[in-house]
Amino acid sequence: MHNHTLAQLAQQLQQGTCSSEELTRETLRRINEQDEKLNAFITVCEQEALSAAKAADAMRAAGKATALTGIPIAHKDILCTEGVRTTVASRMLSNYVSPYDATCVAQLKAAGAVMVGKTNLDEFAMGSSNENSHFNPCRNPWDPSRVPGGSSGGSAAAVAGRLVVAASGTDTGGSIRQPAALTGVTGLKPTYGRVSRYGLIAFASSLDQAGPLTQTAEDAAMMLQAMAGFDQRDSTSIDQAVPDYCATLNDSLEGVKIGLPKEYFDKIDSRVVETVLTGVEELKKLGASVKEVSLPHTSLAVSAYYVIAPAEASSNLARFDGVRYGHRCDNPKNLEDFYKRSRSEGLGNEVQRRILIGTYVLSAGYYDAYYLKAQKIRRLISQDFQNAFADVDVLLSPTSPTTAFKLGEHAHNPVEMYMTDVNTVAINLAGLPGLSLPAGFIDDLPVGMQLIGNHFTEAKLLNVGHRYQQVSDWHQKLPPTFE
Amino acid sequence: MQWETVIGLEVHVQLNTNSKLFSGAATTFGAEPNAQACAIDLALPGVLPVLNHQAVRLALKFGQAVDAKIARRSIFARKNYFYPDLPKGYQISQYELPIVGQGHLDVVMADDSSKRIGITRAHLEEDAGKSLHEDFQGMSGIDLNRAGVPLLEIVSEPDMRSAKEAIAYLKTLHTLVRYLDISDANMQEGSFRCDANVSVRRHGEEKFGTRAEIKNLNSFRFIDRAIDYEVARQINLIENGGKVVQETRLYDADKNETRSMRDKEEANDYRYFPDPDLLPVEITDDMLEKAKQSLPELPQQKLQRFQNDYQLNRQDALLLTSDIELAHYFESVVESEGVGKNSAKLVANWILTELLALLNKAHLTIKQSPINPTLLAGLIARIADNTISGKIAKTIFAAMWNGEGSADEIIDKQGLKQITDSSAIEKIVDEVIAASPNQLQQYRSGKDKLFGYFVGQVMKATQGKANPQQVNELLRKKLQS
């Protein structure tokens, strides 16, 4: 059962082959059995899950079931879930229970999905390896001595190890796509504004987006269908109709123009390039045409990102001061001591590092040279994509420069770690949708292929992904110890 | 006098929207602590601000009323600093692109001259919560009811040259925001707060001197005294070889002095940047037009009209129009049955002398007056139609204040109708004259002052109800012959 896709499980539930309660119990059992190898979960909520499963079965009996009714899923522990703690993998919020559900969580709940737990991540979504977690690192099911990627490492590992059929993640600089690539699953970052950020604990407000991690593009389409939509409570969410993402999955790829941005194949492991280009060949066979394009300002993307994201984070995280909720130090001597110790004790090293960087680039005398400059570069990067999309329908590139690296490999060099985001950050800066697909293996480690579309072209990305997955089977492979 | 004072004022006006600037929580004053602070106001993880458009409309109204340039596109910015009454660790404000730009306010000074004071800008921002340091045994209590309430920060040009000018500007601004109904501008409740930027320079000097910002100014009187103190302090400092430091100073009303708030001389770096959670505010022609249409009659216009339509003198008109509620009260009385424009002067007198005196003594506003316009109109109608004399009216007024009913009811109950029957008065005059032969003789031999004695006697005999003009006429006639 654990190797079925979401679409298959939905069909089984619909046909009565199994109940949601059975499916949920099986999921919980598998998590219980397998998660100690991964540490993909921070919280498992058995009671709540079974309760929701029973309710889903009752909905089905009453004839009110929809596509996701009764499907067990997990949420990245950065999305607020009413009644079940949301820790952001931080000591600061290790006991925080939100009084409300994030909008996308509520929408999935309303669609009947059953939450089984909250998954591990890099603290406050700051990281590319899930090593920055107060609750210990998460491991890659393909090789437990390696990272699953980050920051949505837990969600990716849980889906890759088939502990759960689908999970939500969030992506600010690649945090859905990169772990998807490193663990061999499908991960979608929607267009900025497509999914509400209300209840998504903010890292970088102009970059964050929540999206699904699943086995297949079809599954991702079903998840996105429930997650997407305008939300009045998020002023940056876009009031644009949500199309039926499943309706166009099988569209022909005849005439689809794919662009390969040469800068995205540049500093990449040559075997990764080779693997991705094999995937390109498959798409050509399906009728797509391929040409090389250029995104000239690509080399500035990581720098611009690591100015803008920390800047916004330094402000977003100011509220974590121990005054109204969260970790508060013992016996503060005065206000300054209160703030200093509560935050130093509550927030991890990488988080502190980024707050310091962010504070610096916004400070008087440096704002123009750093923050303002980075925003100007952002505009240029955005323009690069618009120019490319005048020419092609989708862009394609390797998602990550390498396969999964070892735990501790980049521990002593944060900038080295930042460079693993080289192919993903520009997409966030431009607010575009991006989809990572399993495209092959190198030394038994997954390789991901990234599709990038113009704003609100998720349907097209999922269509290309789905057609590709009909002629490839990378997405069906299981990690050896998880069969 | 070699020194010149330069004053600029920053006024924070709490807008009277029903809910907060970025959340739906209520803005009512005086609620139980933290009863009006929702998830957004508490800055819980994951929440986001949503703009209250009514606040924008009120800001536009203000902008139109001061002839200001309106920014077609303005931006909210984060002002970052740490303090327990600032839940997010930043205040959402406006920095480089405020909604209201350059405008002006024409201010009438004490000597009746008019001075145009520039307004540099006005922007929207959210208020912070309150810190309470007493009653908590060495700790502090944080009340977040006020956190998120919409403020319009109005910044003047440094155009004022004395404390008196500053007060005149503030009073004019205060009157205006109440006229516009964008704020109740209650200084005691904190919905109209003023900070003063004060500096001095030698006459003829073009450059401005270093300014100090004075905070904690809770009344017009305090502002007046604080500015005077600060000017003297700065002059004294400079004349003794010192330099004025750019700093924030608190006014201590008990000691009548300003004190520096800073330990170090570092200015806070607020690291302003555009708030990525909010969209730019776009102002359309339609919105501007609607704001203009929504403008009520402004104080200057009302002042002019009161003088023209009601034949009031400038002084009375100024007083009556200084507060919108007072102006409304006045017009309600004049428009009542039995009163009318011809009695406008009478109405003005009664309000400005009798009514305001009692209200001030009882610390009541005109809105809280136990004598409403209908009651006062009833009284004035009876003066106008000669039912009672002005003197008796004062008795009735006091009774009305004590809740004894309408003028007619009191007149009836106490039998206060004026005696206007000439023959009746004549009879009493004759009786009085007959009863006072000595005084009559003295009067006729030249002691004119005794006329008052006879008037007094007639009034006594009629319990004050005889019509004074008729008494005078008849007495003159009878005493001559």
Image (tube, coloured by chain):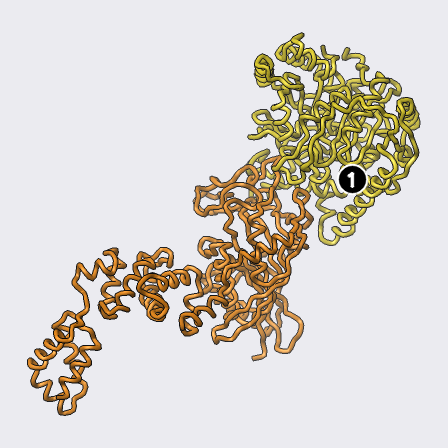
Q: Which residue is drawn at 34% across and 59% down?
A: B373
From the viewer's side, name the closer residue of B62 and B309.
B309
Residue located beneath label 1 in the image:
A430
Q: How many labels does the image show?
A: 1
Q: Quadrant of residue A440?
A: top right
Taking the spot 25% from the left edge, 60% from the top edge, the residue there is B407
Is residue B232 shown left or right of residue A109? left
Q: In this view, does A341 lie to the left or right of B129?
A: right
Quadrant placement of the C terminus of chain A: top right
What's the residue at 53%, 47% (across, down)? Answer: B149
* Image location (x, y in percent) of residue B43: 58, 39
Residue placed most toward the observer, A7 or B118: A7
Chain A's colour is yellow
Which chain hosts label 1?
A: A
Front residue of A456 and A377? A456
Residue farthest top in this picture: A17
